[in-house]
Image (cartoon, grey):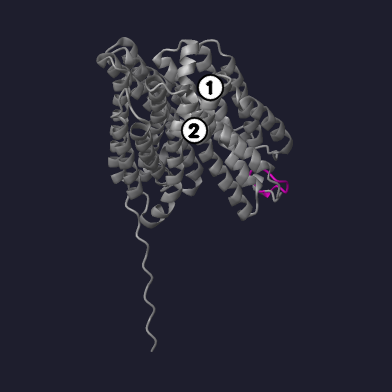
């Protein structure tokens, strides 16, 4: 990598001074696509289930297949970009992502749709790490680079809200298949622009090994754990299928740790977990992923299955929650600067737990203001408050050489939390619904479980290292 710094020609490691905004636009568009696909499917789930005859477990796998393949291969995608060229990996990931969207829209059965979502997550894992790296390597002027990064961050925030809205609009209009088709023309256009306009680079390490076994093992472990948890909906812990899948997940996870401990170029060097702040920050990332994904999932089902909302109306009803997340994530910055990450993280989790407990009290004849808007805004404010302190905790206390790795681990943990948390809470909802003969009580049980998870996260946040006090300036000696 050091050799590339001395080359006269611009590379992925050497900023170019080109003032054009093409790279920033492509990076923002790619970021929008990746984040959009984490939320746009939620509102369409009831329509997908009815059309493809999905079971409850199959319905949640439409979400989990994307999240788990994304999480499992995300670090591998970032590493591949460093070694073999970011434009090359960006374009390859974009092609896979776009084709998977096309296949998903054409799916005629649940397994085909889930397979398409799996490949879409794989494409996202190679696509997602590149945009920010391309911005950092392309813009030499700090002010221009900061503007591009700000636009990239704003795009990610906007995409979450747009996904909910677009999902309802498309499902109510041309149909749920267009939730999958929507990214196809955008992706095709981006591939053409990327091949012509993005700066080429050969990467920093042709011939170096990628930790493919590590990526496969961790993805397989997560998938087995998620499948085992999802099967709890109709079985007990003691059933051979549930117990067998969870045991296999544990074996695969141990194998992953051994591969990482002994590998020359591990995907996830275990040395980074010596930092208590990083460990607790990643625990918070797991919880953020689990709570956010589960809230979106269960509130969507409640609005459409119980209250009879159309997909479009459900998308509009959930918009205040996503807006509250965006607003509070901006407002918390000054608080974190003043008091550190620990207190805002604890307060954020308490607000989230309070909102979830409030929302879990909804009924069959629930009203929008009391049962959806009020608790949704409180949950959004709480989750938004946790994002920045979580990021600081998960990326602090590591050497500078591991800063990028720590960020990748945090992003993977968040996606993993979404997949595993949804599987566990969906099983809780299914079990409660069967025993109580009331779907709404099942959703309430799942939200109560999510509130318990938020409270556990608040307790863990209390264990974070205390913020270091700023040194007081020494008094100047008095004259004379």
**Percent position (x, y) of residue 58?**
43, 15
Q: Quadrant of residue 242?
A: top left
| Front residue of this view, candidates 280 and 310 | 310
Which of the image's four quarters has the N terminus?
Answer: top right
Between 385 and 301, the residue placed more toward the observer is 301
Residue at the (56%, 18%) spot, across then down: 177
Q: Which residues are magenta?
A: 6-15
Q: Quadrant of residue 194?
A: top right
Tell me the distance, in whole angstroms, between the alpha carbons under discs 2 and 1: 39 Å
Tell me the chief SS of the magenta region.
Answer: loop
Q: Secondary structure at mark 1?
A: helix
Kindly indicate the quadrant of the structure image that contains residue 414. top left
Q: Residues within 10 Å of mark 2 (few under 14, many from 20)?
A: many
Left or right: residue 98 versus residue 36 is: right
Mark 2 or mark 1: name the one nearer the start of the chain.
Answer: 1
Disc 2: which residue? 267
- Give the answer, above or below, for where 412 lies relative to 351: above
Q: Secondary structure at mark 2?
A: loop
Q: Residue at x 63, y 46 (%)?
A: 137
Image coordinates for residue 320, horizontal then vertical, percent: 44, 37
Q: Position of residue 365 (x, y in %)?
A: 32, 24
Look at the numbered discs 2 and 1 and tell me whether their residues touch, using CB distance below 8 Å: no
What is the x, y in percent for residue 480? 38, 89
Residue at label 1? 171
């Amino acid at each position: 990598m050091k050799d590339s710094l001395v080359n006269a020609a611009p590379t992925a490691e050497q900023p170019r001074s080109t003032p054009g905004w093409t790279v920033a636009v492509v990076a923002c568009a790619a970021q929008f696509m990746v984040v959009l696909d984490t939320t746009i499917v939620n509102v369409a789930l009831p329509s997908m289930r009815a059309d493809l005859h999905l079971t409850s477990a199959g319905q949640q796998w439409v979400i989990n297949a994307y999240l788990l393949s994304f999480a499992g291969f995300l670090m591998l995608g970032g590493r591949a970009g460093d070694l073999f060229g970011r434009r090359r990996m960006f374009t390859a990931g974009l092609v896979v992502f776009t084709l998977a969207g096309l296949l998903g829209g054409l799916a005629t059965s649940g397994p085909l749709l889930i397979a398409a979502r799996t490949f879409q997550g794989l494409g996202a894992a190679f696509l997602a790490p590149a945009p920010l790296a391309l911005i950092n390597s392309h813009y030499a002027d700090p002010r221009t680079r900061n503007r591009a990064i700000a636009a990239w961050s704003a795009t990610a925030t906007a995409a979450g809200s747009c996904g909910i809205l677009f999902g309802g609009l498309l499902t109510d209009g041309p149909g749920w298949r267009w939730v999958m088709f929507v990214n196809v023309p955008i992706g095709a256009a981006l591939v053409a622009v990327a091949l012509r306009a993005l700066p080429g680079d050969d990467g920093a390490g042709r011939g170096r090994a990628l930790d493919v076994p590590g990526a496969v093992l961790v993805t397989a472990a997560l998938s087995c754990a998620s499948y085992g948890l999802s099967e709890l909906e109709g079985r007990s812990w003691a059933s051979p299928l549930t117990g067998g899948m969870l045991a296999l997940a544990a074996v695969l996870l141990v194998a992953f740790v051994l591969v990482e401990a002994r590998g020359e170029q591990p995907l996830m060097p275990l040395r980074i977990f010596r930092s208590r702040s990083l460990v607790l920050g990643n625990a918070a990332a797991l919880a953020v992923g689990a709570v956010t994904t589960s809230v979106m999932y269960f509130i969507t089902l409640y609005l459409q299955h119980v209250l009879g909302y159309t997909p479009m109306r459900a998308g509009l009803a959930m918009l205040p929650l996503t807006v509250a997340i965006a607003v509070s994530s901006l407002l918390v910055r000054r608080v974190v600067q003043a008091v550190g990450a620990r207190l805002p993280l604890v307060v954020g989790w308490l607000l989230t737990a309070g909102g979830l407990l409030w929302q879990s009290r909804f009924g069959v004849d629930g009203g929008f203001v009391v049962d959806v808007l009020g608790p949704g805004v409180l949950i959004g404010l709480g989750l938004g408050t946790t994002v920045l302190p979580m990021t600081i905790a998960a990326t602090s206390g590591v050497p500078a050489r591991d800063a990028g790795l720590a960020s990748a681990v945090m992003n993977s943990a968040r996606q993993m939390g979404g997949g595993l948390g949804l599987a566990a809470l969906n099983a809780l909802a299914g079990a409660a619904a069967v025993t109580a003969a009331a779907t709404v009580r099942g959703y309430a049980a799942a939200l109560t479980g999510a509130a318990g998870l938020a409270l556990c996260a608040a307790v863990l946040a209390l264990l974070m290292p205390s913020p270091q006090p700023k040194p007081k300036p020494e008094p100047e000696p008095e004259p004379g």
